[in-house]
Structures are given as C-alpha cells and as structure tokens.
Image: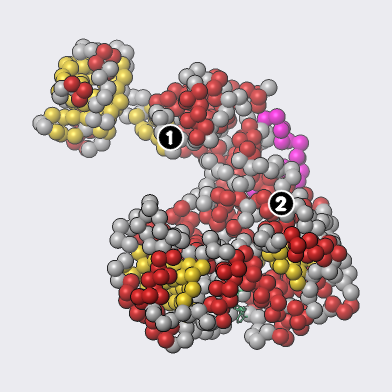
Amino acid sequence: MYLRELTQSVSVLKGAGPSVCARLARLGIYTVADLLLRAPRGYEDRSRAVSFREAIRAGGTANTVGTVTDHDWFGYGRSRTLKILVDDGTATAALVCFHRAFLADRHPPGSRVRVTGSLALRFNELQSTSFEIEAAAEGQGPEAGVLPLYPLTDGLAQGTVRRLAARALAEYGRRTEDELPPGILESRGLPRKARALEDLHAPATPEAAERALRALAYEELFYLQIQVRRRAAARAERPADRPAGPPERRGLRDRLRERLPFRLTGDQERVAAEIARDMEGPRPMARLLQGDVGSGKTLVAFLAVLKAVEAGGQAALMAPTELLARQHAQTAARLLEPLGVRLAFLTGNLKDASRRPLLAALAAGDVDLVLGTHALFSEDVEYRRLTLAVVDEQHRFGVLQRLALSRKGGVPDLLMMTATPIPRTLALTVYGDLEVSTIRTMPPGRKPVVTHLARQGNETKVYEFVRRELAAGRQAYFVYPLIAESEASELKNAREMARRLSEEVYPGIPGGLIHSRLPDEEKRSTMEDFTRGDLRYLVATSVVEVGVDVAAATCMVVEHAERFGLAALHQLRGRVGRSDLQSYCFLVYSGNLSEEGKRRIRAMKETTDGFALAEEDLRIRGPGEIAGIAQSGSLRLSFADPVRDADLLELAREDAAGIVDRDPGLLQPEHRVIREVLERANPFPAETSGA
Ligand code: ADP
Ligand code: MG
C-alpha cells in the first residue's frame, strides 16, 4: 500500500502538470519517491536576518523584512522597467525588476515584504537585480529557515521544485515508515526516516540537513551492501566445476615459464599463486587483478588459462576493444600455441561462414582458449566446459557483460583485470564479492617515463625531440582528441595531423594513422606494420589507449591533453616505457585551461604512480565517475559518496553482513522504497545479479 503510494507518478502532486512532469523526468524524477529522495545540491541559509546595511558592509546576501516606499519606472516601451524601493529600517534598496513588471501589483507602496538578494551600490543607490521578494505578514520576521537548492533543468524554476517537494513532504514524506531493519537506527544513532526526509527538504538548521544527508547515505550504502553480500552468498553456494585433467596436459605452466626470455617478477608469481589457490578451491573464483599499465598482467592471465587447460577445462579471455583482443591473440599464438594450446579468435565482426565452424569447435571442446571481445558471451556462443573467464581492463565493462558471462555453462572461475586501480573503499562498495590481488612492482629495468608539458604553440620543439628519437631507431605515438575535422571544434584532429606530420614535419619517415572508424582490415595491418617497426610513428585517437604493447615506442605525444581524462592520460602514457629504454610523454595543452584540466595535467607531471593518479582522479571527479563505474549501472548513489563516507560504508558493510547471514527475514520487501529507486537504475534485481 505504502510503496504503491510512493511510487505513484509525481503528477499526483498539485502543480505538477504535464510540462512540469516532463521537465522533472529530464532530471530522472518520475515518482513521488524520486522527488522525496532527491538530494538538494545545496542549501541557502536564511535562518538568520541580514539587513540591507549589514549586507552591503559585509558583501553578503540580505535577508530582511521591510516596507515598500515607492515604485519607480525607467526606460521606454518594451524595455520599461520597474524599480521597487524597500526600506528595512537600516537603508532603502532599489529592487530592479527586469521583465517582472507584474511585481508592481503584488507589492504596492505601503505593503510589507520579505526580501532576499545580493546588493551593490550603483548610480548612487543600493541596488539589487537578483533577489526574491514575497509579501510578509504583519509581525513576520525575515527568518525563513534553510532553503534547499534543487538541481534544475531548462524551464524548471527553483520555486516550482521547492513547492512540489514541500507538497510531497506534507502528503507522503511525513508518513514515511522506516525502511532500515529495526535495531539499526538505534544502534547507529540515525534519525527516523520521516525525520530525515523532513530535514532533507525543510531543515531548521544546516546541521539538521547534514544529519539527514548522512542518514540517507547510510541507507543507500546499506542496501548496496545487502546486494553485494547476497551476490557473494549466491556465488558461494554454487560449487565450482573442477574437472580432473588428462595427464598429457600437466606441467603447461612450467613449460611456459621456461619459454619466456625473462623471469616473472615476485609480484607476478605471488598473484599467480593466489589465483591458482582460488582455482583449486571448492567455490568459483571471483578475483580482481589490479596492476599498473605495463606491470605484466597478461602473463599472469595466461598462467591462469594454462591452469584451467591443465585441468581439462576451457578458458575465455575477453578484451574491451578488437585491437587489444587481437594483440592478446597474437601473444597467445606466440606463447601458448607452441605448448599445444588450441586457440580461437572471436569478435562481433566475424562473418557467419567462419563463425559457424568456430562455434562448433567451442561447443565440441576442440578449442582450449578463445580470445575476443564481448562477442565471446553473446547468446549463441556455447562452451563445452568453460571453467575460466578472464576479463581484461575490467573497468570498461558494465554489469551487463559480467552477468551474461556468468550465465554461460556452469559457474566458471572469474578473473578480472584492471590497470585503473580502484581505491579499496570503492572496490569494497562495488565488488564486495571480489577478492583483490595487486601487482605493485614493475618488471626489472623499467625507467619511469619522463613527462614534459608543452603549451600549444611550442609543439614544434616536441616534434624536434621526437625526430631525434625516431632517428635513433625508436618509435612514437601522436594522439588527438578528434578523428577528423569538425565544424563545431577548432581542435586538431588525427586525420589532418597525419597528413601534416608526413608532409611537413617528417617527410620521408613512414607513419600510420589509426582510429575507430577505419575498416578492421586496415586497422589490423597498420598495427602490424607499427609493431614490426615498418611504420615509425602512429597518429591515433584514444583507440591506442588500452593494452597496445610495442616495446620500441619511446615517445607518446598527446595534443590537447586537457581534453583527456586522467585515467585516459595515464593509460596513454603507459603505451611507452615498456622496455629498458628511457621513454618520454609530452602533454601539449592549449592556453585556456579549465581548473580541472590544469589539475589533471599537473598530476600527470608530478607522478607516474597509477594508484596516486586514481586517488587524485577521485578527488577531481568524484567517485561516481571513476573507473567507468558510472557505466556499470549497478551503482547510482545520490546521497552516499563511498570515499567521503568511508566510515558509513564500513558500518553498512557490517550491518548488511549481519542481516544477510543471520536475519534475512528482517528485510521487509514491501517497504523497500529506496531499494525500488536504486534498482530502477539497475536493470538487474539484486537476487539475480552475479548468480
Ligand atoms: P599490462 O599489465 O599493462 O597488461 P603487459 O602484460 O602488457 O602489461 O606487459 C607489458 C610488457 O612487459 C609486455 O611486453 C610483457 O612481455 C613484459 N613483461 C611482462 N612480465 C615481465 C617480466 N617479468 N620481465 C620483463 N618483462 C615482462
Ligand atoms: Mg594489459
């Protein structure tokens, strides 16, 4: 009953006609609950009276009550403008009513008004052009409490949302029942739900609003942790598929180690052992392997693959782009095929004629390792015995793929790899059901990439530097934010720069162009030519961001670097410094940098540590967006910030664990309004995710 009331369309509120509703929908507000659970983006404290005189002295906003002494008009015709003169006992202010002539009738001379607004001395009078005015009753003071400032969209006025929120609060919010299981409110010292909603939309003090925000943040985190915990429990109940492998397949991992021209680092061996232990356990593995770009995750993945194959299972390795998938396939062909591992390569672009026999081979068990893009887990792909799924650059995949993947066959072991380190708090929030392994050290002999910043206009110096590296037999990348010329933008683009570099800057030196719109065949051959060293430099867009591994490349030039996110810049820089040669990264930025752009570029200059950059990214962008979590679909937090609220997160984890493990009955589904709102953002209900 109660849930049904709250999940009614906002149109049940007086004043929410079709056009208002359409605008609210643009903000993601469809139901009464959406509105009640929408956090204001801030508050305006009008709990204190500020006279005109005080405001002009201190430079703040006036919040006062006074009498209209006169109306004044200036200008002619359509630009005729009203001025309302108000005396609050300390001074007279002229309120300039641009396009608001109707205020003349509402506030005639002699009437009492409440005024809030900023003031300035202009033309010898105290003026305000940006103010709010309303009629004040006799004896009413200026104190109006703390006003919420809601996020708005075109054509939706602050006053409209405030009125609707106030109605929603009066008609439904104050009757809201508590949703958290009994006991938790008390033990955590949280306000009742109705109180929290009241203080969210109509707080008496800024502190009350703060308390409400924390209570609602806790509630969100609690339900997220319930989801995560349930997922973990569901996984733990399923036994893993642990076949006993045929004898002729033993020792594949040792044979790979012998074939390598180098030794694995201590960290690589350690995480490989952690993975191997999981793969022998009674439960399917769910492990996140994080390690900075170039730390050698691919080999660790191959060791896991070989372990699966030794045991007589099949493995699938999924990469986010075809370019990277192909590169992995080539590495696998070099390292694994000689060991007798049967490989296949599958992407969405594969034509039916070659696709059909490949699918048949997978289903028959004639393939040990299949590499490819998300096509690996499309509906028609069947495995004979998939026991390991590896997902590279996990942050680029959403929940959707994770699910599609875990539905195939039995319950395979799952290894996800990412070079975008996720701070622990965030990893806990999102992947509460994952164990985390981390590679911290780079292979020996690596020199940190030297990063130089150059202002647009000085890029010829950069080109000269690169010329010397090219002459010494090294290779280079040039990366641009756009593929081709765009009418809407002055930015340099890859196509035009490929022409300029080859005709004007490096005539006679062979270079290539690669971007997502080129035909696959062309991308592939360009990449091969560059890998072989036939092409000396590559002009590209961010398609080369992930995974591309060419050891002789020592220069990464990113133009309009301010256009790239921190994670992308770090990935791009990770394309060089992949051998014992000294490498360089040049970030060319244009003059009018935003504050954020400046911070990103400075951070890149200051550190090459991916973990430090991820933390900085978090500070600059906020957690909602980091690591592509915005795309993951399962996490749409409006109150909680898992980094800022790390303490709450920890409490929520404890509470959720206690409930799921001991008292699942305490969760009353009919009362889960906040869950309803959360899960609308998540197309997969908690019960099925990850199962
Ligand atoms: P990432 O972790 O970014 O996926 P890769 O697996 O692509 O890194 O490895 C980067 C490069 O380092 C590859 O060329 C790989 O062959 C090389 N490499 C990996 N492990 C070692 C090692 N232990 N010693 C030397 N080179 C290594
Ligand atoms: Mg990689």
The residue drawn where x is 20% and y is 25% is 79
Q: For mark 2, what is the residue?
A: 403
- x, y percentage for residue 266? 64, 79
Depth order, front residue of 574/59: 574
For residue 33, side relative to residue 504 (left or right): right
Image-quarter location of ligand 1: bottom right
The residue drawn where x is 46% and y is 79% is 510
Where 186 sits versus 598, above or below?
Answer: above
For residue 528, side relative to residue 414 (left or right): left
Q: Quadrant of residue 134?
A: top left
Depth order, front residue of 43/295: 295
- x, y percentage for residue 621? 46, 53
The residue drawn where x is 52% and y is 72% is 575
Q: For mark 1, what is the residue?
A: 153
Q: How far apart are the two marked residues, 2 and 1, measured between alpha carbons?
A: 34 Å
For the magenta stretch, what is the residue range? 653-671
Where 238 sits versus 521, above or below?
Answer: above
For residue 245, side relative to residue 512 (left or right): right
